[in-house]
Amino acid sequence: MALLLCGAWPLDRPEGRAEQQRWLQALRQALPGEDWVLHAPEGAAQAAAIEVAVVANPPPGSLQGLPRLALIQSLWAGVDRLVQDLTLPPGVPVCRMVDPAMNEAMVQTALWATLALHRGFFQCQQQQRTALWRQPPQLRAAEWQVLVLGQGELGGRVGRSLAGLGYAVAGWSRRSRQHEGVTGLHGEEGLARGLATADTVINLLPLTDETRGFFDAARLARFKQGAGFINLARGAHVDEQALLAALDAGRIGHAVLDVFQQEPLPAPHPFWSHSQVTVLPHTAAQTDPRTAAEVVAANVRALRSGAALRHRVERSQGY
Ligand code: NAP
């Protein structure tokens, strides 16, 4: 039996090959003695040997023709591109990455951005450009309402951590969720209530048919006047023109954006130079091969022992 490692790494470039090798090394360490296939299987015998595909947004069609494939394990947390591949073998479980190092990094990014919005530090950065000495108002954390959209692995952690620092946190999810210190909201009515009162809105929704284009002009118009917006999930959640209009109108006071419709963000994009936008280069939380490889290994062992697989994706829901 063999494992297939398949990603969208640009293997015609040294950095693409280095990235693939970095993953292979970590996976070999976590799963010693396994056979790895690093390219499209050659011939029926090699294809029939593949039991697990470990994937990082593989080119569509890559997982066809593998008769013994029993597990598709994503190296990325977001599986939006993976599950859109209509050639993905039906019935084969898809599991996504829930990496402790990535979880930790996402909490750090969300805390930094929320603190900077709450304390007016982005504003101070702007003021420095014109040597303007003006102290922003200092509110208590409990007076600052944060709405976290998505209460899954990342949103749940972010909400609990902010609540731990004393922020007034609400969390919105599809089903009703209870996280310590976080007011659970769901449904359109819960969303409307949360948006109307939040000083900071953090997006940690998955990208699905239901959430694509979620932040359109109508939703942005429901934000509290001057609210901060932190998008750490996917660029396709946001209508960027509508966001620019909401920033210019002052409906959104400041946006911290880690993800974009097009990445890398093109040089002429107005976000780069907008005084109310902080751009991050999709770096809120990266998967760490050292810890992620252990997560892959645990699922491969679970598959072989007949134990339950962890972090299984509901393919019909898209996350
Ligand atoms: P997750 O564990 O799958 O959680 C998703 C959450 O969103 C759940 O609470 C779910 O509700 C809720 N949800 C899904 N569809 C919804 C809908 N239509 N209406 C309301 N709530 C809905 O996802 P995650 O691992 O936390 O990841 C969150 C996002 O972070 C993803 O977009 C991922 O791609 C992104 N991400 C970004 C980076 C980065 O560096 N920027 C890194 C990693 C991940 P239920 O609880 O009811 O199911």
Image (cartoon, rainbow, N blue to C red):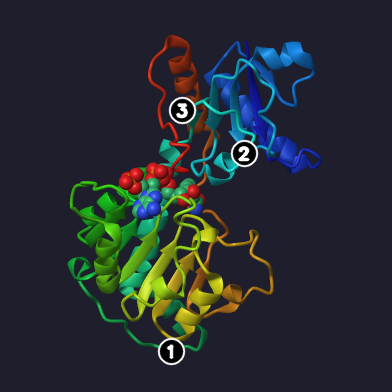
Task: Please give the label number shown on residue 86.
Answer: 2
Q: Quadrant of residue 121?
A: bottom left
Separation of residues labelled 2 and 3 (CA atoms) = 26 Å
Residue, x 69% and y 23% (percent of image)? 65
- Left or right of 156 in this view: 289: right
Q: Where is residue 296 in the image (x, y as percent from the top left)?
A: 50, 26
Q: How many numbered marks does the figure carry?
A: 3
One can see residue 107 in this view: no
205 up-or-down from 289: above or below: below
Residue placed most toward the observer, 97 or 313:
313
List the residue tagged with mark 3.
295
Looking at the image, is mark 1 or mark 2 nearer the viewer? 2
Separation of residues labelled 1 and 2 (CA atoms) = 55 Å
Task: Please give the label number shown on residue 132.
Answer: 1
Graded by Cα atoms within 10 Å as few (under 14), some (14 to 19) or many (20 or more), the crowding at tag 3 reads: many
290 up-or-down from 282: above or below: above
Q: Quadrant of residue 120?
A: bottom left
Looking at the image, is mark 2 or mark 3 nearer the viewer? 2
Q: Position of residue 213 (x, y in %)?
A: 50, 63
| Mark 1 or mark 3, earlier in chain | 1
318 up-or-down from 247: above or below: above
| Mark 1 or mark 2, earlier in chain | 2
- Left or right of 89 in this view: 203: left
One can see residue 72 in this view: yes
Task: Please give the label number shown on residue 303.
Answer: none
| Mark 2 or mark 3, earlier in chain | 2
Mark 2: which amino acid?
Answer: Leu
